[in-house]
Image (spheres, grey):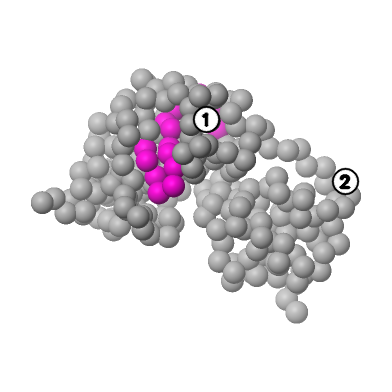
């Protein structure tokens, strides 16, 4: 019987050597086990792959892999997207929902969370867990198997609405409502966007304690992966100052 480590290596080599996808090793907390910025621009070698930890495996999305992935976290949302937005010949079953694979359009695709409150987009500077990664209820699996990215339909830019314009001179009356449109995605200015969210809360007149509570609520829905409470506290302290 093939072991998880052997399967991990086999999948990683298949993705990189046959399908020209960049990959990185992942921990069980959905965070990379290595510094991975360089793999947003290049595909790892087999030697690099053999030297990595082998817990879970992620495919790096964006131009490097010629790939954009739509992540639906429920069957209902996945069926809605498939029927009303785009149909992909490559589908992965995740813990709660499905991933749809699309070809990169050639222009930068920013990551996005909760688009139309139904799906996330993983583009340049993003990644998605892929088979044979495991989760608490089983493993990621192919519903429709992977193919050459040249055979995928092109991701439609209208599926990823542009980020809202921010007027630094505009008064912010409801800080928590304002930051609901700010998202922090690992590898896509996540640190900066989280810092900006705290700044908006301060500008709206919240105290440091109120901002921390608001950021904890924001963290559950707008950060991927979520920050720890200590990390959020550090962000708030960096804006408000330590007390």
Does dot 1 land on a helix, a strand or a loop?
A: helix
Q: Residue at x 27, y 43 (%)?
A: 12
Q: Nearer the viewer, residue 132 or 67?
A: 132
Residue 196 is situated, as x and y percent measured from the top left of the image, at 71, 54
Disc 2 element: loop
The label nearer to you, 1 versus 2, is: 1
The residue indicated by pointer 2 is 170
Position of 101 with respect to 175 (left or right) is left
Quarter holding the C terminus is: bottom right
Which residue is farthest left?
1
* Residue located 30% across and 57% down the image: 55
Residue 101 in the image, given as x and y percentages of width and height? 42, 31
Is residue 44 a member of the stretch shown in magenta? no
Residue 100: say if magenta. Answer: yes
In the rendered structure, find residue 81 and report the number of the disc placed on it.
1
- Please provide percent x and percent y for residue 72: 49, 39
Question: Residue 116: which quarter of the image?
Answer: top right
**Magenta residues, start to end:** 92-109
Q: Position of residue 227 (x, y in %)?
A: 56, 62
Q: Are marks 1 and 2 in contact (CB under 8 Å)?
A: no
């Amino acid at each position: 019987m093939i072991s998880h480590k052997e399967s991990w290596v086999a999948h990683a080599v298949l993705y990189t050597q046959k399908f020209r996808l960049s990959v990185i090793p992942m921990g069980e907390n959905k965070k990379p086990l290595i510094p991975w910025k360089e793999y947003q621009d290049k595909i790892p070698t087999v030697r690099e792959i053999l030297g990595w930890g082998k817990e879970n495996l992620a495919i790096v999305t964006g131009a490097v892999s010629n790939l954009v992935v739509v992540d639906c976290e429920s069957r209902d949302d996945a069926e809605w997207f498939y029927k009303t937005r785009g149909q992909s010949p490559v589908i992965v079953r995740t813990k709660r929902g499905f991933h749809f694979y699309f070809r990169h359009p050639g222009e930068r695709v920013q990551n996005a969370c909760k688009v139309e409150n139904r799906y996330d987009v993983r583009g340049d500077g993003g990644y998605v867990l892929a088979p044979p990664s495991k989760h608490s209820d089983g493993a990621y699996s192919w519903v429709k198997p992977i193919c050459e990215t040249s055979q995928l339909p092109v991701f439609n830019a209208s599926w990823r609405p542009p980020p809202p314009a921010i007027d630094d001179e505009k008064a912010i009356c409801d800080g928590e409502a304002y930051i609901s449109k700010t998202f922090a995605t690992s590898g896509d200015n996540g640190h900066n966007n989280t810092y900006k969210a705290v700044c908006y809360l301060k500008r709206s007149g919240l105290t440091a304690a109120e901002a921390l509570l608001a950021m904890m609520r924001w963290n559950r829905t707008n950060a991927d992966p979520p920050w720890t409470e200590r990390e959020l506290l550090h962000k708030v302290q960096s804006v408000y100052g330590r007390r």
